[in-house]
Amino acid sequence: MAPRVRFAPSPTGYLHVGGARTALFNWLYARRHGGTFVLRIEDTDVQRSSADMVTGILDGLRWLGLDWDEGPEAGGPHGPYFQSERLDRYRAAAARLVAEGHAYFCYCSPERLRDEREKAEARGEAWRYDRACLALAPERVAELEAVAAPRAVRFKVPATHTAFDDVVHGPIAFDPRSIEDFVVLRSDDHPTYHLSVVVDDVEMGITHVIRGDDHISNTPKHLLLFEALGAAPPTFAHVPLILGADKKRLSKRHGATSVTEYRRQGYLPAAMVNFLALLGWSPGDDCELMSMAELVGSFSLEGISGSSAVFNVEKLDWMNGQYLARLPAGELAAAVAPLLVAAGLSAPGDPAWFHRLLDLLRPRAKRLTDVADLARPFLVETVEYDPQAMEKHLEGSDVPGHVAALAAALGTTDPFDEPHVEATVRATAADRGVKAGVLIHAARVAVTGRTTSPGLFEVLVLLGRDRSVARLERLVDFLATPRAGTIP
RNA sequence: GUCCCCAUCGUCCAGAGGCCUAGGACGCGGCCCUUUCAAGGCUGAAACCCGGGUUCGAAUCCCGGUGGGGACGCCA
């Protein structure tokens, strides 16, 4: 049977990288086995859910290249895919549980429950619901109903031992006595997470539940619910959490946690996917750089590690650099263009020239934003001289003369290609009796304003004879002009 | 506190009883290339949490300890 898996985010927040990885594992599993990837929005918490969050999550998934076969916008035979539109089903399920003796009404006030918990905590104990309402006399129930007292539905946890075989963790067993009679339907008639997940997983025919480790302790409750609802439970695979550098669950304190944020910072989706896939999963060999197709080809739930993983940004940076180096020029240009605009620049009109520039810059960049920054000197009319660069390479009194000589020599260099430009620069240095480096560094400041750049000869050729000469001459003029604040 | 999960270089992984003198990657150090910065090539340092078993033999299996994490809501 083809597997049906689902990613079920709650739109109470953005798409967290941990969630993105869970989604990725589900997606990979579905694609690997020709199954179906369902996207379901768990928005039963009306107070905290928002439509904007849904949009953000959908955009994030799409950006990563994770498409869903059923879900919002895609539709499907098991819809609706928003839990807020499925409330009647949960209510029906709750009613059925009560009718069949698997659940009962609870009239306890939240205040009372809170007080009991606080008292228990003061004693250093964990408090579990005392089943007060299970033992309510019929007369008392009648009284409560007569005044329409708010009531929730609680699941009557049976004494059955709950055990399951987790694909990543192996056999896991829970003592039912450690599980309290949890609420399945709130007094406002909205289901709790436990009820809605199970009802939906049953109705949507989910065969494999691949979700975060933090749900392990919820699993026995779900197992009990599946049983009470007369459905066979799916296979469970609990993937370990992603941690921050301090080994605590990754949160905003550790820096960026949202997929959108990484996107904004200039990471490539393919790099993000590759990195996330390798966080807690391994193909079994030493492969590091893997395309989406390769990931699909070798993904297996058995390859998921049982221990949590620290999110290592340095490795992400390296990986992104690798992808940046391999990205086809056209795609890189398209990805960088908007960043240039955002930086007040504009992409060059000549695509071939733009691509040459990009090829010079990409090995020096980790992220798209680096490319945009590195491109600046090549896209402005007049470069800004970095004070440190001036101090470092323009201090010598004969520098203006050297640069002027180079400008003159380059003015007649023909053809203006790398070998000839290099020969000219070296010959000029020799004529002036200085090491080539002196001239090269000064020229670099002239044409880029910076201490670092791609190889000078490549830069000069890219800029072309006219612009190169003009920039060299401008530096000569600049050095000849007394500036305020300079010591004579 | 109770329950559950986890435990190999700083980090991410490989390792499913002898192939381990523990392998790869990131990061870090060195060297090479070199006009700067990167990239690239070569190279180095760096780990089986501790204690008991089982076995001819344990990083691998079992038990205990310790450590880390997670869950204990009318949140998801």
Image (spheres, rainbow, N blue to C red):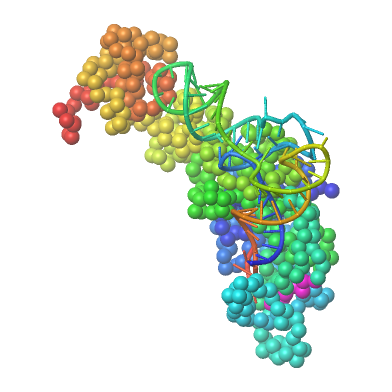
For image coordinates 62% across by 78% down, the residue present is A116
Q: Nearer the viewer, residue A57 or B33?
A: B33
Question: Does residue A44 appear to the left or right of A414 in the view shown?
Answer: right
Relative height, residue A26 to residue A230 (above, below): above
Q: Nearer the viewer, residue A246 or A418?
A: A246
State yes or no: residue A477 in magenta.
no
Relative height, residue A323 to residue A247 (above, below): above
The x, y position of residue B4, in whole percent, is: 71, 58
The x, y position of residue A286, in whole percent, is: 67, 33
Relative height, residue A73 to residue A461 (above, below): below
Quadrant position of residue A409: top left
Most extreme residue toward the left, as rendered?
A488
Instruction: Quarter of the image for the C terminus of chain A: give it.
Output: top left
State yes or no: residue A157 in magenta.
yes
For image coordinates 53% across by 47% down, the residue present is A245
Residue A22 showing in the rendered view: no
Question: Does residue B11 appear to the left or right of A301 in the view shown?
Answer: left
Quadrant position of residue A78: bottom right
| Magenta span | A152-158
Quadrant position of residue A304: top right
Question: Does residue A60 appear to the left or right of A416 in the view shown?
Answer: right
Residue A468 showing in the rendered view: yes
The x, y position of residue B20, in whole percent, is: 71, 31
